[in-house]
Image (cartoon, rainbow, N blue to C red):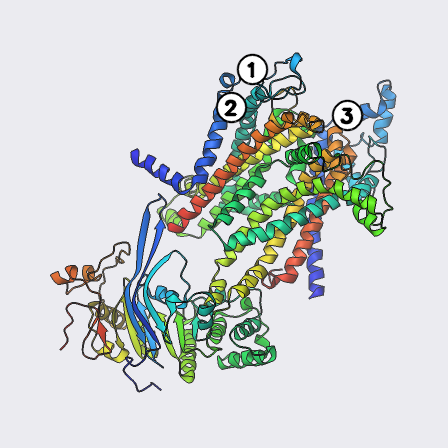
Amino acid sequence: MRTTLMAWLNVFRGFPSIAVGLLIVGLYAAMALLAPWLAPMDPIAVHADAVLSPPSARFLLGTDGNGMDLFSRIIYGARYAFGIAVPAVLLSILIGLPVGLWAGYRGGWIDEGLLRCMDLLRVFPSIILALTIVAATGQSIMNVILVIGLLDAPIFARVVRAEILALRGGLLMESARAIGNGTSRMLFVHLLPNSISGALTQISVRMAWAIRVSATLAFVGIGIQQPTPEWGAMIRQGAEFMVTGEWWVALFPGMALVTLIFGLNLAADGIQDWMGRRRTQR
Amino acid sequence: MWVQLFRFLLRRLAVSLPLVVGVVFVTFMLVRIGGGDPVALLAGPTASAQEHAEIRKGLGLDQSLVTQFGIYISKAAQGDLGQSWLSSKQVSEEITKRALVTLELLLWGVAIGALVGIPLGARAAARRGSMFDQVVRALSLAGFSIPTYWLGLIAILTFFYALGLSPAPMGRLDATLITPDRITGSYFIDALLRGQWEVARSALSHLLLPVMTVAVVACAPIMKHTRAIASEIVDSEFIRFARSSGLGERRIRGMVLRNSMVPVLTFVGTEIVGLLGTSSLIELIFSWGGIGQWGLQSILNGDFAAIQGYVLFAALLSVVVFVVIDAANYLLEPRGRERM
Amino acid sequence: MTPAATSDAVNPVLSIRGVHLAFASRDALGAVRRAHVLNGVELEVGPGRIVGLIGETGAGKSMTATATIGLLPPSAEIKGQIIFEGVDLLSLQGAALDKVRGARIGFVAQNPRAALEPVTRVGDQLVRLIQAHSSLSSQAARERAIAILEAVGIPDPQARYRAYPHELSGGMAQRVVIAMALVNQPQLVIADEPTTGLDVTVQAQVLDLLQQLVRAQGAAALIITHDLGIVAQYCDDMAIMFAGRVVERGPVAHIFAKPQHPYTRRLIAASRARIGTALTSMKSDPPDLFRQTTACVYADRCELVAAVCQSAPLEKSCSTAAPDHRVLCHLAQTP
């Protein structure tokens, strides 16, 4: 147990980006979980006397156009960020991993279909696609999760497929086959663990993406709306007030967004470096 | 070679068009299945059931979805993209009016982003592990993490509100000035060409913030990718061999540049496609009046034909960009030619 | 046509003296590990002589070449001297080093197709190399390039001049690489495993070509290989490396007749056995380069091992029968 801990600490020492990134993400996750205890006020409570007031002792980050406390709203906003990103990424893994495994291992029409899907997504800026679909199919959180999850699934599928293709000709497959493994055993026991490493980096990246897209959707006015304390929706409202100088309404939610996304990207970058270093040393 | 290139491009187009149709199909179905009912919008609250039915028939909504799609495609091929319910104008007209506006923003932004990002990325690759490299990596990571619209808002706050350097984010020109006669569709260029310095200056000052926002967002991935590509080449066997032949740092740098150009430019092309969505948001914030703003508003308003037009435009633009990239690859990359 | 001189003591072209090379790195858990790749390499290449540098994988042959040609990464920790034309190559950097390599020292790379720049025509690459080291006009350089292409046996050199590297076969590409190594008439040619990846018949052609051109120019050569057959057939002198040290060196005929070092004996026996019937077994564990020792590194595998081998330092080789046949072994006696 102790050596595992030592190993982890050494990884962090060699790759500080992983440590810092995970720290940031951890802080936000804590924020999301402990929101009711951390937030000083009810996020949707209206303080009619203090509409659009700048940061003060009473309202640490000021209030927005509805008189709601920004600080509390930002803390609660973490819930929405994770609440959308985590299920969405889980969904895309759930769909993408098996599809990628099958496409890489068996090929055939699933593989073709996957490639066509990727082509389609490539031809098209995904934000616009997400916007259109969510707008068209009804603007609920569930839909946002579904859409993001579906749009990201091919990426996971492709990553896994690439790893499997790389492993396919290799010794691992031959020896496992020679011992007499059936198909499903091949897939789950042998191939899957070895192809995970690529997917791991993607998890962090995709989560950053999911948070970003859901905020963008809310910003445009699709999906989550006021008075829900979602960061994108808050920026949307804040946009109006930027021109008149009430800068805090859009600035702070944005900073929260940027920091969390940055943390996720940083961790992803670090994981990729670490994986690369491990691979060259094997 | 040119004949082969032409044939190759034709093949690429032939492959891409079904994809475009596919994208439009998906959008078509989604918008109609899930979206609101435009008939009620058009008919107004006092219309009778009969009038509803008539409008429905007039819009062709009484037929099956597949038929509707077929009609749409055949009309689209002839240039008729339907009518926007909100403005009652032809969708094709709306698009052509705004296309160049969006392209101006997009191309300027990507150009500046590339002009800054590529040299920085290349330099970082040459000095990997150095402080310069760390800074470049951190910057590109940060650039990846900033939502474009928020950056635009901050820019407005800083340069318009706080510093008063930029004009209000309302459109492309001061309201008091007359737009120059149209040559290219770009206010800035047209004004310059006609010697209208005042107008040109105003157009430029309005261009600055949105273009810089796009440039910053474009710069980050370009910088990161250039660094990755250049690193791979710097580490490659042939650069090693060139060093062992005493070719000298200057020539080696030229080799690295020459060999990374094609993959980097290819990436910039894909960035343009990716930035279509982002620039739409910028247009929204700055009231730019381009296709992006129009498209987003159409989505919010459930304007079927307009949404489809927007999607079609984006898909076609992507195809054009990819075909151009493929052509560049074909011309500049000797290795790929046999495969093609 | 082998040069008559058997002694390389008179002004060797290349003299490697006491070179130690180590690489420090962090493993996946962050600890520092230092690999000692070269441990006191002593090697000389006489004028006009072809020297074969032989050893198993990881013995340090390629590293020796890399160090000579100045391609070590900045993290390399190197000590010692590599003297070429009176100058210590290890002290040269930048432009001074670039003057030497490609002009005075030619390098034949291991993987010819990978060594050539993919987006430039082969002829243009040659011309670039010529012009980097001379002031010839493009026309003159072009002529010289075509001439050398012909000399390396490339059919229709005018047409091949315009070819891209990926259009050439492996053997053809290797000829081009040889052309590039020789075009500026170097004094020393270093060839790092020049036949890897080539068909057996092509291997012979390439080696014949290399030997012929080197002799024609009166240059010296250092051929790095793991194939004793190549050394036997093409080299005048040989040096055997093990775990970063040269354990034996001298004229090929001598060493084959009377190998002094146990490792050399095993090598020769093993390759003779490939044709014969008796198989000599070799302990297969490669030496651990992270363990540094001043005593004999071969002690663990040696059948003649004595107590002195594992305790006494072993840095300077001693002569045996002839002054130019040297061996790094406590037990080798000078008769």
Left or right relative to C202: residue B186: right
Nearest to the observer: residue A184 or residue A64: A64
Q: Chain of mark 2?
A: A
Picture quarter with the N terminus of chain B: bottom right
Q: CA distance from mark 2 to mark 3?
A: 38 Å
Q: Chain of mark 1?
A: A
Q: Amino acid at mark 1?
A: Met
Q: Amino acid at mark 2?
A: Ala
Q: At x 71% / y 26%, what residue is drawn?
A: A244
Q: Which residue is mark 2?
A: A32
Q: Position of residue B55 (x, y in %)?
A: 85, 27
Q: Position of residue B300 (x, y in %)?
A: 73, 29
Q: Which numbered disc flags the more N-terminal residue, 2 or 1?
A: 2
Q: Quadrant of residue C145?
A: bottom right
Q: Is residue A96 above or below residue A242?
A: below
Q: Which residue is mark 3?
A: B37
Q: Amino acid at mark 3?
A: Asp
State yes or no: discs 2 and 1 in contact (Cβ < 8 Å). Answer: no
Picture quarter with the C terminus of chain B: bottom right
Q: Quadrant of residue B218?
A: top right
Q: Chain of mark 3?
A: B
